[in-house]
Image: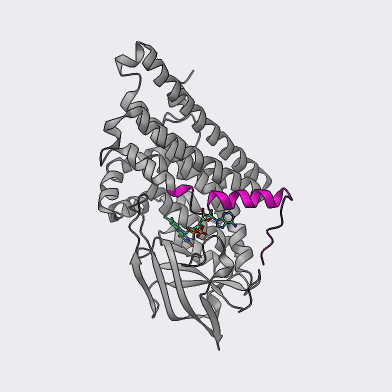
Amino acid sequence: MDRPDQGHFGSNGAWEGLIEAERFAALLAGYPEQMDRMERFDPEVVSLLRNHEVWRAVHGSNGVETDLTTQCRWIEALASRCTSTAVLVQSQLTVGHTILLSGSPMAGELLEEMRNGTIWGWGLTEAEAGSDILSMKTTAHQEGSEYVIRGSKRFISNAGIATRYLVFARTKAERGSKSISAFVVPSDSLGLSIARYEHKMGLRASPTGDVVLDDVRVPASSAIGNIGEGVGLALSTLRWSRPLIGAVSVGVARGAFEELLRVVGPSNDELRKLTTLHQAKGHKIAELLMQVFAARALLYDVTTRADSSGELPAMWEASSTKAFCSEVAMKVASEALEVAGREAVAVGAPLQRYYRDAKILQIFEGTNQIQKNAIMKELGLVNFAVR
Ligand SMILES: Cc1cc2nc3c(=O)[nH]c(=O)nc-3n(C[C@H](O)[C@H](O)[C@H](O)COP(=O)(O)OP(=O)(O)OC[C@H]3O[C@@H](n4cnc5c(N)ncnc54)[C@H](O)[C@@H]3O)c2cc1C
């Protein structure tokens, strides 16, 4: 019988197909603390991702798209070592899924570029449009065979390292579910600039910035999906991408748990003595294991059911997964810090990084309050119809 921390969490092959992801994630071991300190994504990590064909593994190839479970397993493995790297790959998969769902004639070509390592950013949020995306002010006006995009997107992951952005913009002045459309915008477009970068408490290696679109002209064929269907496309994408954030969260929870075991684990003779003090510690560690185990069970229950049905997870399932797993990541990282004690709060110690990264997981891809609204809506408890 496997030990709980090895059979399920380790790289000993308990999970078919996970070995490659775990092996790759182990290569990241030297980077996260240094990238966190430098607040910069190391280009060597991007090269590693490309050279090991990680994007091919997560996106699929030869016309066969990778399933949600496989994507989540990869993301979990990456996040267990480096949250910023996991989020880089997760952002790609999110854009990739929007493109797939759109049925765009460009889909095949764009996905092939992604498999070859093109980095994308997903541009939905604005200064005054976070949870309420219909408040967005960025506009796209048609002029002949082009759209002219004007506005600014805030807190966009992969800003500056992306070579393409998927930008959501208002194509109708009136507020409403048919007022927004999605466009592919190359990063070298005239009028596109990165105005500033955020200095964040967590996910510090993942660049987050303001993407400014100053009358950027794109061909009308750059629209992804039909004009006016951007909100529907974004919401359907969230049914795929929220479980992906669930996977980042399980990875962070597991990474923090494994780090805790490394710091105070059974190799520590004192713990084996089971004095009252250490039994209390041991109980805490056991509770954290249960949390990671429960979050992972929820995640893969949702993904395997989605994969076997061939349908997107329901929004309530996607939202439950995102909210539950990110709460677990926060709890495990926070309590692991407490159990590990003073060494764990030092700059450069992995546990304090997991803790800072976990906080962001509760906020992005829809805050956990917004996930509860989505669940309430599907339970028929309240009507949050897009208006
Ligand atoms: C590191 C990071 C990376 C990001 N990357 C991207 C990206 O790549 N692309 C992108 O488009 N966006 C990105 N975002 C933005 C992210 O999706 C938003 O931050 C998120 O949707 C929340 O919006 P907000 O920050 O404006 O908060 P607000 O909407 O201002 O919310 C503030 C608070 O009010 C609560 N609240 C708001 N409305 C309600 C309501 N109706 N009911 C109950 N509570 C409510 C929220 O839960 C929250 O607690 C990123 C954010 C971060 C932190």
Q: Give the position of the C terminus as an image quadrant.
A: bottom right
User: Residue 157 placed where, x, y %?
Assistant: 41, 59
User: Residue 28 placed where, x, y %?
Assistant: 32, 43
Q: Is residue 163 left or right of residue 168?
A: left
Residue 66 visible in the displayed image: no
Q: Nearer the viewer, residue 254 or 30?
A: 254
Q: Nearer the viewer, residue 107 or 263?
A: 263
Q: Does 251 appear above or below 46?
A: above
Q: Quadrant of residue 142?
A: bottom right
Q: How many marks?
A: 0
Q: Does 101 appear above or below 373?
A: below
Q: Which residues are magenta?
A: 360-387
Q: Residue at x 46, y 36 (%)?
A: 331
User: Residue 329 placed where, x, y %?
Assistant: 46, 39
Q: Is residue 294 left or right of residue 152?
A: right
Whether residue 378 is in magenta: the answer is yes
Q: Residue at x 31, y 38 (%)?
A: 350
Whether residue 220 is in magenta: the answer is no
Q: Quadrant of residue 156?
A: bottom left
Q: Nearer the viewer, residue 311 or 252?
A: 252
Q: Nearer the viewer, residue 65 or 241?
A: 241
Q: Does 218 appear above or below 131?
A: below
Q: Quadrant of residue 214?
A: bottom left
Q: How is colour applied across the structure in the image?
A: one colour
Residue 169 visible in the displayed image: yes
User: Residue 139 placed where, x, y %?
Assistant: 53, 78
Q: Does 286 appear above or below 47?
A: above
Q: Residue at x 38, y 41 (%)?
A: 355
Seen as rendered, the residue at the extreme bottom is: 144
